[in-house]
Amino acid sequence: MITITKKAAEEIALSTHNPENQGLIIRFAVDQTEEGFQYLMGFDERNEGDIHLKSNGVEYILAYAQKALLEGMVVDFDQLQAGENYSFVFMNPNDPSYEPPKENQAPSKAD
């Protein structure tokens, strides 16, 4: 469903140590705007109708209504440009503005 790379999984795991996040699960969501997809993630409680899965050791949830929009997405944690801060990167083939990464820049599930 959603692939969370090892780097992203490690960063999410660090956030689970925050007392405010205890007992919560990471939720992924997307808003469709005129500018394209806007990705959202944060810790939340599981609701009825949520899809509950696991990738690279990280449990995550998403609303069933968003399944078609998020199917096949890869979440990574990396620099987009050399010298920039690290951030979460969402690579979603369902996004109208999605461009696949070049072969030598694509993250592997183990990275």
Image (spheres, rainbow, N blue to C red):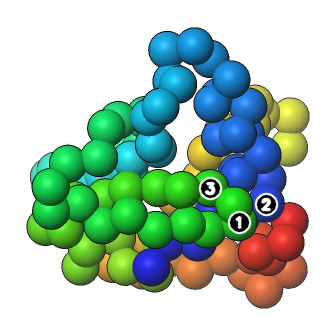
Query: Do the residues bearing badges 1 and 3 touch, measured as CB atoms within 8 Å?
Result: yes
Q: Which mark is residue 58?
A: 3
Q: Identify which residue is drawn at 65% across, 41% down.
A: 12
Separation of residues labelled 2 and 1 (CA atoms): 6 Å
Viewer-side label of 3, 2: 3
The residue located at (79%, 60%) in the rendering is 6
x and y percentages locating residue 43 in the rendered image: 43, 34
Q: What distance separates the C-alpha of mark 3 from that of mark 2?
A: 10 Å
Mark 1 and mark 2 in contact (Cβ < 8 Å)?
yes
Occupied quadrant, residue 61: bottom left
In the image, which disc is placed on residue 56? 1
Identify the image quadrant of residue 93: bottom left
Mark 2 vs 1, N-terminal side: 2
Do tag 3 and tag 2 residues touch (Cβ < 8 Å)?
no
In x, y percent, where is residue 41?
A: 42, 41
* Mark 1 vs mark 3, CA separation in Å: 6 Å
Q: What residue is shown at x 29% (from left), y 47% (from top)?
A: 46
> Looking at numbered disc 2 in the image, what kind of residue is underneath it?
Lys
User: Regarding mark 1 in the picture, which secondary structure is present there?
Assistant: loop
Residue 109 visible in the displayed image: yes
Residue indicated by mark 2: 6
Q: Which mark is residue 4?
A: none
Q: Nearer the viewer, residue 7 or 79?
A: 7
**Residue 42 appears at what percent x and percent y?**
42, 35
- Where, quadrant-wise, is the N terminus in this rendering? bottom left
Q: Earlier in the sequence, mark 3 or mark 2?
A: 2
Q: Residues within 10 Å of mark 3 (few under 14, many from 20)?
A: some
